[in-house]
Amino acid sequence: MPLEAVEARRLYRQIADQLRALIDSGEYSVGSRLPTERDIAEQLKVSRPTVREALIALEVEGRVRIRVGSGIYVSEPAALASPLPATAMIEGPFELLRAREFIEGVIAEQAARVAKPEDIARIDDSLHAMANTQHPGDVSMVHDRAFHVAVAGCLDNAVLVRVVGELFDQRLNPYFAKLAHYFENPESWRAALSEHQAIREAIAARDPEAARISMREHLMRSQERFAQSFGTEAASNPRTQAGSG
C-alpha cells in the first residue's frame, strides 16, 4: 500500500474535535452551556483566539449556538447541520489576518516607494466608494477588497495582486463569515475606513515605514475587533441549563 501524505491538524480543529467528542459523549448535554472561552483557553493552555476559531467551527457545523452576553450552548439535535468533514482544512480567521498583516505590511512599505499618481487615484477611488457605502453588506466588501488590491497594484506585480485578492476572498469562508456576523457593524466600518485613510496618506507621502506600520496596525486592529468578548465571561456555572429563546 503506498504511503499517503500526512497533514498537520490545525490547532483550532483539534480543540473543536475535543469539544465535539465531549458533546457526543454526553459530558455537555443539549441545552447546556459550555465553559467560557477564557476557561477553555486556560485549561488547554492555548490562546483565546484559537478557542474562538474552534467555537466558530462548531457553530458552523450546528453543534453549538453562541448567544452574545449569555454563553455558548449545545444545540438541539433538530438544529444540527451536516457536519463539515473532519479533515476540512479551512484557515481560521485569525490565522488569515496574521498572514495578511505580514504580507500586506511589506507590500504597503514598498508601495510607498514606487506608487505613481494613477496608483494613488485608484486608492482614492476605493476610499471614496467605502465612505459612501453602508456596512455590513456584500457591496462594502467589494470596496474594502478594492482598497487592498489597489495598494498591491502599486507594485505592478500581477502575482502579488492575485495573492492579496485571494487572501481577502477567504473572508467568504464560513468560519470568517460567521465571526464577522457578530462583530462587524457601521462603527467597525468607520474605524476600518479611518485606518485605510492613514495607509493612503503614508503611501502618498512616500513614507515606507509609516505605510508598513499603518497597514499592520489596521490588520492587528481587525483581529482585536474580532477578538472582543462575546460577553459571556461573567456567566454562571457552565452546566446550567439554557432557557427558552
Image (cartoon, rainbow, N blue to C red):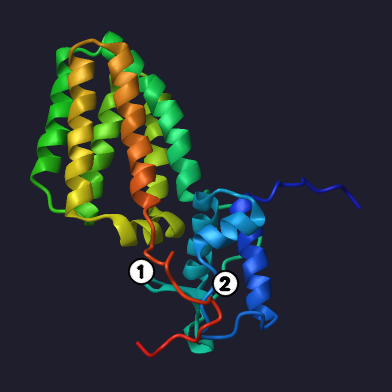
Residue drawn at point x = 49 percent, y = 57 percent: 52
Labels 1 and 2 touching (C-beta < 8 A)? no
Asked whether 68 or 102 is in front, the reply is: 68
Q: Is residue 29 above or below residue 3?
A: below
Residue type, numbered disc 2: Pro
Badge 2 element: loop
- The residue carrying mark 1 is 68
Q: Taking the image as drawn, is residue 155 in sight?
A: no
Q: Taking the image as drawn, is residue 150 in sight?
A: yes
Where does residue 112 sit, x and y in percent of width and height? Answer: 27, 14
- Residue 36 as seen in the image, left or right of residue 28: left
Q: Residues within 10 Å of mark 2 (few under 14, many from 20)?
A: few
Residue drawn at point x = 23 percent, y = 33 percent: 195
Q: Earlier in the sequence, mark 1 or mark 2?
A: 1
Instruction: Please give the label number shown on residue 83.
Output: 2
Classify residue 199 by image quadrant. Answer: top left
Where does residue 165 sit, x and y in percent of width and height? Answer: 36, 37
Badge 1 element: loop
Q: Is residue 160 above or below residue 13?
A: above
Q: Is residue 156 above or below residue 148?
A: above
Classify residue 129 by image quadrant. Answer: top left
Disc 1 to disc 2, C-alpha distance? 23 Å
Asked whether 57 or 160 is in front, the reply is: 57
Asked whether 27 or 136 is in front, the reply is: 27
- Residue 189 as seen in the image, left or right of residue 235: left
Where does residue 56 sit, x and y in percent of width and height? Answer: 48, 62
Residue positioned most to the right: 1
Residue drawn at point x = 18 percent, y = 15 percent: 204
Residue type, numbered disc 1: Val
Looking at the rendered image, the quarter that the C terminus falls into is bottom left
